Amino acid sequence: MLVHLNAVSLFAVYCFVCLLIYILILWLKKRTFVHPHILSKRRKNAEKRRKRGSLSDCRQELTLNILFIIAHPDDECMFFGNFYGEGDRRRKELEDSCAIFGLLSKHVFTVNQEGLEDDPLIFWDVNLVASTILKIVKKQHIDQIITFDRHGVSGHRNHISVYRGVRHLVAEHLLPKGSKAYSLETVSFFRKYLSFFDLPFSLIMAAIPGSRILLSSPVDVLRTQRAMKAHWSQFVWFRILYVMFSRYMLVNTLQPITRNSPT
């Protein structure tokens, strides 16, 4: 009985600690991926433009362009193509989902190219992936890239291929000067479905130099769940469980991609 009470007490304390961490991070949260040196430079340039009377250029100078690189429609919601022959429908679902996040369709880029077909059993060619990404990075003046890590979150080979393509750009110094790349940390199956209770572990991982932690408010979580519903063709029972219990719906930890990052 004593052991049972102690276990219950420990669990209650752990829940309370998780709640405190959640509230504290939400209170302190000012999510930005811009490096302080880049931000300082942007502010100086914006001030110069403001003095010249170019207000629109000033606003543009302070805008950070972030590119989320995913392998399939619905990855933007859950980090789980045309594998089932529904490419056109899924493209429309992706645009509808991104609209819920406030992204305009002109800022959503889909690649329908031979060699990059959706297939969980195939690794995409690294050079092809890298060159495809680089074209968008240069055209859209991207400052930060966020994508999967070497485990692809779910182990999907297409996800892993995207990471390898981005890592190739970083390792070969092909990205524009000042551009940074981050990968979404893959966690164990146990941690993946801890939801709110994964916060202490995520906080520890975020202590690694260069790492970032992103925490969603309850409103953010509900918005993401609504966005996932836009992918109705993929909304099967196990994805419903995912959006209900996955820690990725609430907290994400990002690691910097460097030339020394594992392949």
Image (cartoon, grey):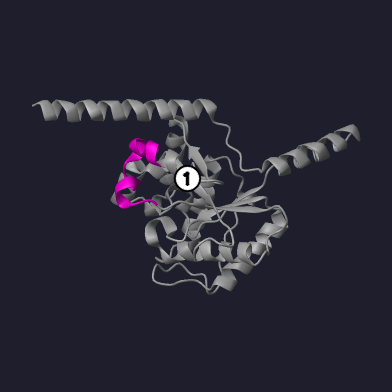
154 relative to 132 in the view: left or right: left
Q: Where 137 sits versus 131, above or below? A: above
65 relative to 238 in the view: left or right: right
For label 1, the residue is: 253
Density class for disc 1 (Cα within 10 Å; few <14, some 14-19, many ≥20) is: many
Residue furthest out toward the left: 1
Quarter of image, res 12: top left
Q: Position of residue 20 (x, y in %)?
A: 40, 25
- Write the start and end of the magenta stretch as one range: 187-201
Q: Residue at x 38, y 51 (%)?
A: 187
Front residue (pair 230, 7): 7
Residue 152 falls within the magenta-colored stretch: no
174 relative to 56 in the view: left or right: left
**Quadrant assignment for the N terminus:** top left
Q: Residue at x 59, y 72 (%)?
A: 127
Front residue (pair 141, 171): 171
Q: Position of residue 150 (x, y in %)?
A: 46, 61
Quarter of image, res 38: top right
What amino acid is found at the position of numbered circle 1 in the picture? Thr
> In the rendered picture of this protein, how many numbered marks are placed on residues?
1
Look at the image and tell me whether residue 36 can be seen: yes
Look at the image and tell me whether residue 81 can be seen: no
Front residue (pair 10, 149): 10
Front residue (pair 232, 135): 135
Q: Position of residue 201 (x, y in %)?
A: 38, 41
> Secondary structure under badge 1?
strand
Secondary structure mostly taken by the magenta-highlighted segment of the chain: helix
Residue 188 falls within the magenta-colored stretch: yes
Q: Position of residue 69 (x, y in %)?
A: 55, 56
Q: Where 149 sits versus 226, above or below? A: below
Q: Residue at x 85, y 33 (%)?
A: 50
Quarter of image, res 6: top left
